[in-house]
Image (tube, rainbow, N blue to C red):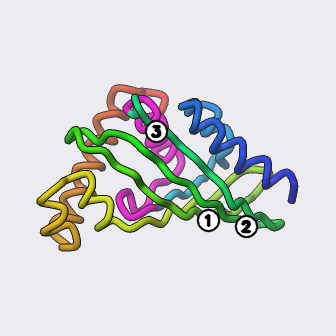
């Protein structure tokens, strides 16, 4: 269990340093990542997402705590502060769960309040409509397009 605790600590410590390579080294080759925006990312797409977020997060600050691990699963709480591409400041509060396999993170799910995020990132539109399926869908589509464009420029993530 100590190995799993260290794995989670290594992942978030690397995130604090914006060291996507070290983050990705914590992931199993068959990683499955999900959150309210990306929904389901597998393998190299999940790794590319962290690379993209680290590269774009010029003022990104990460804090993590409350790591709990067992033999095959674990959880952690983390928070992120950054400026979104709208120029608006965001403070995202996330709870993560993990499944471990072969000494790596094989499944990673981040849960956060997407409406809270849209209110911060999108301002008045997010306040008024961030709860709506239309805005949520638009946020997801924009994120996927951004990830696709990032992958197109980084052949190491192309499958």
Q: Residue at x 40, y 63 (%)?
A: 39
Residue at the spot 77% in from the left edge and 66% down from the top edge = 72
Q: Which residue is mark 2?
A: 73
Residue 43 left/right relative to 153: right
User: In front: mark 1 or mark 3?
Assistant: 1
Whichever of callouts 2 and 3 sits on the residue coming sooner in the sequence is: 3
Q: Which residues are magenta?
A: 35-56
Magenta span contains residue 46: yes
Indicate whether 58 appears above or below 82: above
Of badges 2 and 3, nearer the viewer stands 2
- Which residue is label 1 attached to? 97
Q: Quadrant of the N terminus?
A: bottom right
The answer to whether the residue labelled 1 contacts the one labelled 2, judged by CB atoms less than 8 Å apart, is: yes
Q: Which mark is residue 119?
A: none
Q: Position of residue 29 (x, y in %)?
A: 64, 46
Q: Is 100 on the left or on the right of 122, as rendered?
A: right
Q: Earlier in the sequence, mark 1 or mark 3?
A: 3
* Residue found 27% across the figure and 55% down from its top: 120
Q: Position of residue 45 (x, y in %)?
A: 45, 45
Q: Position of residue 137 (x, y in %)?
A: 21, 64
| Structural crowding at the residue carrying mark 1, measured as other residues with C-alpha within 10 Å and reported as few (<14), some (14–19) or many (≥20) | some
Pointer 1 with pointer 3, Cβ within 8 A: no
| Residue to which mark 3 is pinned | 48
Q: Does any portion of residue 98 appear in the rendered image? A: yes
Question: Quick one: SS at disc 1?
Answer: strand
Residue 146 within the segment the image draws in magenta: no
């Amino acid at each position: 269990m100590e190995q799993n605790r260290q794995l989670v600590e290594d992942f978030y410590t690397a995130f604090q340093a914006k060291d996507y390579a070290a983050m990705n080294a914590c992931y199993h080759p068959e990683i499955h990542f999900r959150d309210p925006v990306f929904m389901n990312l597998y393998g190299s797409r999940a790794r590319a997402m962290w690379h993209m977020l680290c590269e774009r997060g010029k003022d990104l600050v990460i804090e993590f705590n409350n790591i709990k691990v067992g033999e095959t699963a674990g959880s952690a709480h983390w928070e992120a502060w950054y400026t979104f591409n709208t120029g608006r400041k965001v403070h995202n509060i996330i709870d993560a769960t993990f499944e471990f396999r072969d000494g790596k993170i094989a499944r990673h799910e981040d849960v956060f309040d997407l409406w809270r995020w849209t209110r911060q990132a999108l301002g008045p539109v997010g306040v008024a409509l961030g709860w709506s399926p239309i805005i949520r869908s638009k946020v997801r589509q924009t994120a996927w397009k951004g990830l696709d464009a990032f992958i197109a420029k980084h052949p190491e993530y192309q499958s």
